Structure formats: structure tokens, C-alpha cells
Amino acid sequence: MCPPSILRTQLKAISTGRTHGSAPTFAQCVWNTLGSPFVLLVMTLSQPIELESPGTSPTELDPGRQALAVEYAGVRRRLFFLEMGFTLGIALLLMVAGWSVGLRAWAESVWDDQWVSPALYLIALGGGYTLLSLPLDYYSSFLLPHKYGLSTQSIGGWVSDNVKSLALAAIFGLGGIELLYWVMRVFPEWWWLVMAGLAWFFMVALAQLAPVLLMPIFYKFRPLDDAELVQRLTMLAEQAGTKVRGVYVMDMSSRTTAANAMLTGLGRTRRIILGDTLLKGYTHDEIETVLAHELAHHVHNDLLKGLAAEAVVITAGMWVASRVMIWGAGVFGLRWIGDVAGLPLFGLAMVLSGLISMPVANFLSRQMERAADLYALRTTGKSQAFRSVMLKLAGQNLSEADPPAWVRVLFHSHPPVSERIRVAERAMKRET
């Protein structure tokens, strides 16, 4: 609905590793919120689906797990549209019904100050939205992953992570909103361009600080104690011209059964992070191909390309928001574009801009990921291990191997698993 809720979603992605497919009516969204307690009780009593560990290297995709993956992906897509419809519906209702103007009037009646009133408005708005969306959030991020055997987190752990995410979103959100309306007051004509630049710099700073400030809030880290693997991964990074600050293990198993690895951070904060779930069921060769893929993004300057693309998307979104705010000021009774009562309208414009740009961003991302796969296959020469990794991850993470074309276009930032397996098989033939 507004930037703080979007930020909270991103923070939850850090804490849970979740990834989210026709758009529901507002009435359906209201029913989902009001009727969810009964549905959640039924889902809690349902029998969870048991998943096996990856074990030895598979030779083909497991049909049973792929059937579950297709089912799970379908549920996630429906939830995406439901959550988006709920958020956009609430934002529209706040503006059309005049509730946002009323909330601003209440905030000013409590403390009429250009800094305090927006903060009170945001606290009330964010708190109300959080409570309304809590049942759907509980289902999508706790009950559903447990049902499909993808979560190991206790209800206490889930609550703890959500409180942390909410606290961080409140801190960043309050600061961001105060900055937004200060910029609007100082630069009424060009606020959108100034905010786009500030948002981009914040994104760069967050990329550098997340490994040392944000991720430790949710996960525990320890240095990898496998000397051979540390040496292999460090040498691989050196060959790619990347300096890393060490190889660390992240306790992903405290929250999920999914496996992952990453090369995260910028400059002095760059480090290799392996999920403990990856170490349990994968060989050194397989882990090496995973890291080689991540290193390819450094070699190809994908981070800089991504930041440049984000700068374009953010700037375009801010410009669209500025046009919408000018139009909405007269339609919804706002005092001017810097009226905090227009915040839901600002958030609505930014979300819609992001949705429109999402297929293009995903297309560019898939191209980068394809190039990274080829780099990993070429530099390691371990196409069999790469293929094995894809098969294991597809089963362990419940990844839909061959999604419909429209799903790939709209939602997928990576090529389908089936395509990546075929690329590895072609490489295997060349090696023989």
C-alpha cells in the first residue's frame, strides 16, 4: 500500500527466503481477511506434505515432487494476485472514501507539526494495514510453507522474525516518508528526480550493509570449517577477480528446508555465504558450480547493470507518481502534492509502475542468469555436477521445472529449471 509495507516485504524476503499468480475483487479481498481465521484453523489441522532430502545425486526430475511443485507454484501465484489486489484495494478505498484525509486530520489534531503529523499518520496507517493483512500473511508465509514441507520454523520464530521485520520497516519507513515530504517542500517541481536519486543511493548502501547489519538480525553465521571447500571456493573467487572477506555458513535450516548460496555485499563487505541446507546434501563439485554461477555476475558486471536498470525504473516510477499526485490532488481533496493524505496514492502509483516494468526487468534478469550459467559450465568444466545441482534444487526447493510461458514472462527472474538442465546436458556432450 505504501513504501513501508513494500520495504517490510523485502525485509521478510531476507528473513524467510520466500518467492511468490484473475485479480480478485475488493469484496474477495475483504472476505479473505474476515474469513481467514476459519480457513487458517482448517489448514492448521491439515496433514503436512512430507518431502525427502536430496540424498544421492538424482538422474532425472522426480515426477512426484514436480507435481507438488506445480501445485505449490499455482497457489503462490494466486496468493500474489490476492495480496496485490488486497493492497491496491485498500489504497483505493482510503482515497475514494476520504479515510486518508480523515486520518491526516486526526494526526494534525493530535500534534500539528510538519514532522510529527506525518509520523503519526504513518504509524496509524501502517499499524492498521499490518493488522488487516496479518491473516493472509500468516497463511502465505507460515502455514503454506509448512504444508509443503518447506519450512522448519516454529510459530515463535515466525512471530519473532515478523516483529523484527516490522520494526526495521517502521524505522526505514518513517525516515523515508519524512525525507519524501521534506524533499517535496524544498523541491516542489523536481522532488521526484531528487527522491529517485536518494532512493538509488539508499539501495546501493543497503546492498553493502545488508550482510553485516541486516542479515545477522535474522540468521546466525559462522566461518565454514571445511578447509578443502574454503580453499576451492576462495580460489574460484580469485580466478574471477573477486576479493571476498571469507566463506560463511548461514543457519537456513532454522527456518527452511530449501537450499541456497550467495555472493553478497560490496567491496569490503563481500563474502561467500552457504546455507547449511546446501552443505548437507551437495558435493563439493556441486557447490563449486553454484558459486561459479554467482561469481559470473561479478565478472559480467551484472550488479552495475542491475543498479543502472533500477535507477531507470525508480526514476520512471517517481515521475509517474508525480503526475498522479498532481491529478489526485484535485480529485481527492488534497491540499497539494505534499499532503501526507496522498501517501496511499503515491504508493499506488509506485506499485503499478513496478508491476508494469516487472516483465522487462525479469527478461533482462533471465538473460544475465543464462550468461552466468554458461560461465559456470565453462570455468568449472563440471557440467554433470551443474546438472545434478539443478535436479536436486528443483526437488528440494519445489521449483516448477517447466512453467507456462506467461508465468515465465511475468514472474521468473531465472530461466526455467528444465532449460538450465538442457544447457548442462549440451555441455556434457561437448565434454565427451
Image: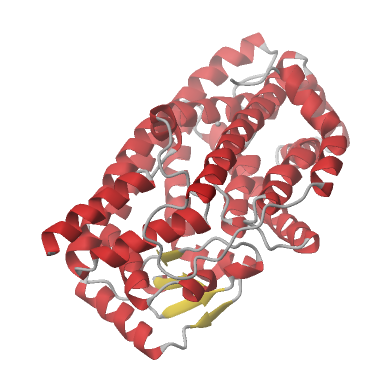
Pick the residue in front: 296 or 414.
Answer: 414
Residue 38 in sight from this viewpoint: yes
Judged left or right of residue 71, residue 97 is right
Give the color scheme: rainbow, by chain, secondary structure or one colour: secondary structure
Q: Residue 88: percent from the left, percent from the top?
A: 64, 25
Above or below, 25 against 154 in this view is: above
Q: Check the picture and name the quadrant holding the C terminus.
A: bottom left
What percent of the width, then of the height, locates residue 167?
A: 72, 55
Residue 86, percent across and down? Answer: 69, 27
Quadrant (top left, top right, bottom left, bottom right) of the N terminus: top right
- Measured along the vertical axis of the image, is residue 223 above or below residue 177? below
Residue at position x 64%, y 25% in the image: 85
User: Residue at the location (56% across, 20% down)?
Assistant: 325
- List the single residue furthest toward the top: 331
Q: Nearer the viewer, residue 268 or 183?
A: 268
Residue depicted at 50% across the width and 65% down the height: 54
Q: Is residue 112 left or right of residue 302?
A: right
Examine the rendered structure and indicate whether residue 31 appears above or below residue 330: below
Front-lying residue, 76 or 346: 76
Tell me the quarter of the picture where residue 266 sits. Answer: bottom left
